[in-house]
Image (cartoon, rainbow, N blue to C red):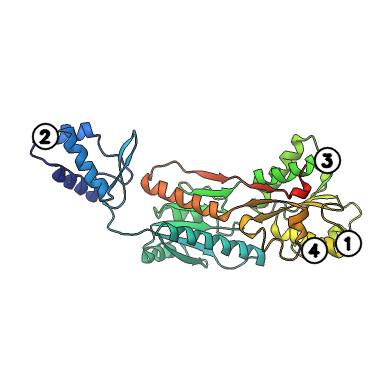
């Protein structure tokens, strides 16, 4: 039955609010149009519009141009804040990976702070998904971020976490768990930029120094570099690439550079690899940019500090592929907020572009 015109905007707003609390209007759903509400409540369109404005002023709905009013979480869940949990592996990393891990966590925490969110770290120490679910409930977590550098979570683990129903974003994560959004730097594109730079400088024999296929990240970098070489009609087989697991060791880098078949151009697509080669080159009296051309890999935030800490020539003479953790954190929280507004969004893999930093002295 239609309501009568005596329904004022405040009464209509209260009715809609109760529907939100009862779950009749789902999180992220669009409310009925002004015309439909006017018909349902038997009121003038202006009265229905004022009711929606009241809900908007309370933060219960948000107006979206040309689409209508969308229900936000505030009227349906009696919480006044968002709490994001970082499920973090705490052991099993080489030192340089641990440094990246902690820098990434810091960037995520800073982004949470800027948005007024509470953040909490949940160390992963082999707990079952059931135990983690209880820990997340005790935290009051409303979203989850997984950092899985090195693919160390057990098989099936991410999928089990998705059953908890929290908006979840994976970082450095190869999981294809249904419903888990991924935010990844585009490492194929970054490695292609590195290879293309050396090709433009006339190199046809290009070395590879670092992991090759043991991790998700190394496979993506290999694929990007290999594609760039094939586009330039350069044989992959002729490059002689092989796995170098201990690429951060200066002694290993020195031995590599002393090989009779050592190429003059090298892809060192790990920060530790590039630094080890730079140290070894200095010990052997090789000049970067002349005797040895390499392309490194670094965070934007670390480029002028950690990356060149013991070899400024890396910055002055060599190109480097970089990415920003600030951009990563911003994209992660944007995606969580999108999914909070609209839970039914399709699962997304967001690839963030990387940049090639070329010192002015080596630009052509």
| Number of numbered discs | 4
Give residue 279's mark. 4
- Distance, label 3 to label 4, CA atoms, is 25 Å
Front: mark 4 or 2: 4
Give residue 2's mark. 2
- Using residue 147 as the reference point, say whether residue 112 is left or right of it: left
- Image position, residue 242 (x, y; %): 78, 52
- Using residue 87 as the reference point, say whether residue 303 is left or right of it: right
- Distance, label 4 to label 2, CA atoms, is 80 Å
Q: Earlier in the sequence, mark 4 or mark 1?
A: 4
State the residue in front, 303 or 160.
303
- Using residue 349 as the reference point, say whether residue 312 is left or right of it: right
Give residue 285's mark. 1
In this figure, which residue is indicated by the disc labeled 3?
Answer: 202
Give residue 106's mark. none
- Up/down of 359 relative to 35, above or below: below
């Amino acid at each position: 039955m239609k309501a009568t015109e005596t329904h004022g905007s405040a009464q209509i707003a209260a009715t809609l609010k109760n529907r939100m609390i009862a779950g009749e209007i789902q999180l992220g759903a669009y409310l009925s149009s002004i015309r439909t509400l006017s018909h349902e409540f038997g009121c003038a369109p202006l009265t229905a519009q004022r009711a929606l404005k009241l809900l908007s002023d309370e933060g219960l709905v948000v107006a979206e141009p040309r689409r209508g009013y969308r229900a936000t979480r505030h009227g349906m869940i009696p919480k006044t804040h968002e709490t994001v949990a970082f499920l973090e592996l705490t052991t099993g990393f080489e030192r340089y990976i641990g440094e990246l891990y902690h820098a990434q966590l810091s960037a995520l925490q800073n982004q949470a702070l800027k948005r007024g969110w509470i953040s909490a770290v949940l160390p992963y120490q082999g707990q079952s998904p059931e135990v983690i679910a209880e820990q997340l409930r005790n935290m009051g977590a409303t979203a989850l971020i997984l950092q899985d550098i090195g693919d160390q979570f057990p098989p099936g683990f991410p999928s089990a976490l998705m059953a908890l129903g929290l908006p979840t974003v994976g970082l450095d994560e190869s999981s294809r768990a249904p419903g888990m959004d991924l935010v990844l730097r585009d490492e194929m594109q970054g490695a292609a930029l590195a290879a293309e730079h050396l090709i433009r400088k006339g190199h046809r024999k290009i070395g590879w120094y670092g992991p090759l296929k043991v991790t998700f990240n190394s496979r993506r970098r290999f694929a990007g570099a290999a594609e760039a070489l094939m586009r330039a009609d350069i044989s992959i087989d002729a490059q002689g690439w092989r796995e170098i697991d201990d690429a951060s060791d200066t002694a290993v880098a020195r031995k590599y550079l002393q090989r009779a078949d050592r190429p003059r151009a090298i892809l060192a697509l790990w920060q530790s690899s590039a630094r080890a080669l730079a140290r070894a080159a200095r010990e052997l009296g090789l000049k970067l940019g002349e005797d040895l051309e390499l392309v490194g890999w670094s965070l934007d935030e670390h480029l002028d500090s950690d990356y060149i800490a013991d070899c400024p020539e890396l910055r002055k003479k060599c190109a480097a592929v970089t990415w920003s953790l600030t951009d990563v954190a911003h994209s992660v929280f944007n995606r969580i907020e999108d999914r909070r507004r609209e839970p039914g969004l399709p699962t997304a893999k967001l690839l963030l572009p990387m940049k090639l930093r070329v010192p002015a002295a080596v630009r052509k």
